[in-house]
Image (cartoon, rainbow, N blue to C red):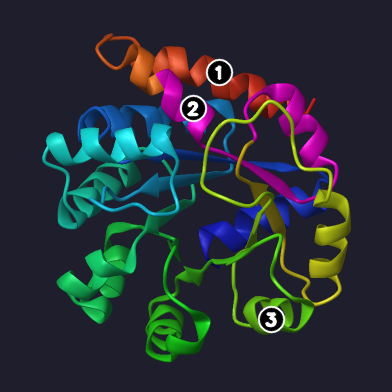
Amino acid sequence: MNRIEGRFRKLRDSRQKGVVAYIGAGDPTLEATRQLALAFDRAGIDVLELGVPFSDPLADGLVNQLAAQRGLASGTTPPRVLETVTAIRRDSGIPIVLYVYYNLLHRVGLQHFIRSAATAGVDGLLILDLPPEEADDYERWMRESGLCAIWLVAPTTPEERIAQIVGRGSGFIYYVSREGVTGMQTRVADTIESRVTLIRAHTSLPIAIGFGISNPEQARDVAAHGDAVVVGSAIVNRIAENGSRPDLAEIVGQFVTTLVEAVRP
């Protein structure tokens, strides 16, 4: 069984909610990424999302854009991200999803990248800018490699299209809880409950809710409506503030521990 599917099954069986943590790969270095992954595993994070640095991350707000710049500056490339995943796998079985823009995979070669990702120990891909209507080959190669294809549903997605999107997904559905780009927010959207209910009418897959969740209190409140919460910018911001410190992984690990404790008291 794919590690993502196994983790969500375990959460379901124990009636617990999950926490998905996003960081930019190579921010500030790929060795730091490896150390952060291990710290997150110890903290109880359920899925690690690694953002593959890209020069034009159109779905990302300023915090994650700057993380991508730092990743590029540290020499992070898609093959080096996969090498880091392989290094993480020597010490951890934490489920790993790559958050990536299609241009990078097209440049490397989509089928080649998917097979290389599976060999490295990646469990799923979340491609930000690949329309489902153009994903037949992608989905076939993902199934053949045993990887989960994670799809996004937005607050503005019509119900007919929700049904089309979730029918193609595996692992979990990522619900983008607000319009716009990634980034920390002072309050969560008030439409989460109704939108998640609508999505659930069309899929039995777990639903992870992200975009704008910034602190343990928000994570706890949002978790009540979904199967997991996704926290990114708030974690990335702490990496930016402490990136030069030798105890970076410990500091950021302490913050993600508060997220896990809020969602799974």
Q: Which of marks 1 and 2 precedes in the sequence? A: 2
Q: Quick check: marks 3 and 1 in contact, CB under 8 Å?
A: no
What residue sits right under mark 2 in the picture? 235
> Which one is in front in this view, the residue at disc 3 or the one at disc 2?
3
Q: In x, y percent, where is residue 60?
A: 43, 46
Q: Is residue 240 above or below residue 141?
A: above
Estimate the spatial distance between the alpha carbons at disc 3 and disc 2, rounded to whole Å: 31 Å
What residue sits right under mark 3 in the picture? 161
Amino acid identity at mark 2: Ile
Where's the N terminus, which quadrant?
bottom right
What residue sits right under mark 1 in the picture? 255
Amino acid identity at mark 3: Arg
Amino acid identity at mark 1: Phe
Query: Tag 2, which secondary structure?
Result: helix
How many C-alpha atoms fall within 10 Å of the one at disc 1: few (<14), some, or many (≥20)? some
Q: Quadrant of residue 122?
A: bottom left
Q: Quick check: marks 2 and 1 in contact, CB under 8 Å?
A: yes
Direction from residue 193 to residue 139 in the image, left or right: left
Q: Quadrant of residue 101?
A: bottom left
Estimate the spatial distance between the alpha carbons at disc 2 and disc 1, rounded to whole Å: 8 Å
Instruction: Report the span colored magenta.
Output: 213-238
Q: Is residue 85 above or below residue 100?
A: above
Residue 142 belongs to magenta span? no
Residue 226 belongs to magenta span? yes
